[in-house]
Image (tube, helix red, strand yellow):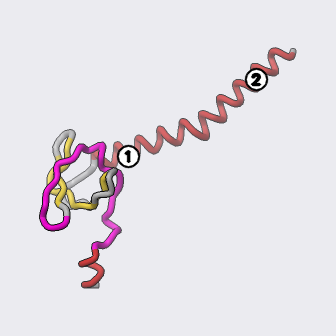
Amino acid sequence: MEGSQGLIMMVLIIGVMYFFMIRPQQKKQKEQQKFRNQLQKGNRVVTIGGIHGKVDGVSETTVVISVEGGTKMKVEKSAITSDASNILTEEEKKRA
């Protein structure tokens, strides 16, 4: 009887860990992958390093982004973390 209670507790602990830690992380990774696969020219993005830019070209594994001053950077798709289209640049704020 005591051994089965211990086993049930272990299964419950593993179940709770799965539903509160592992599953949400997997869902977030799938959403990030979907976002990266849907990148298009003109999208505003932010890289893992905090670089804000506008997508200038997309290939299978890399993205070319234009940053301030017209500089173009080629980065891995996995380095793109978020959509920055709702973040206005300083120039856009001045015009508004």
Task: Return the residue nearer the eye: 53 or 31.
Answer: 53
Image position of 89 with respect to 44: above or below: below
| Nearer to the camera, 1 or 68 | 68
Which sits earlier in the primary sequence, circle 1 or circle 2? 2
Residues drawn in magenta: 68-89
Question: Where residue 54 sits in the image (x, y, percent)?
Answer: 21, 61
> Does 96 appear in magenta?
no
Question: Camera-side residue: 62 or 38?
Answer: 62
Secondary structure state at the residue bearing disc 2: helix
Residue with the mark numbered 1: 32
Residue 63 image point, x, y percent: 19, 48
For the point 27% across and 49% down, which residue is it?
38
| Residue at x 12%, y 64% (from the top left corner) | 70
Residue tagged by mark 2?
Answer: 8
Res 93 quadrant in image? bottom left
Q: Is residue 96 above or below residue 56?
A: below
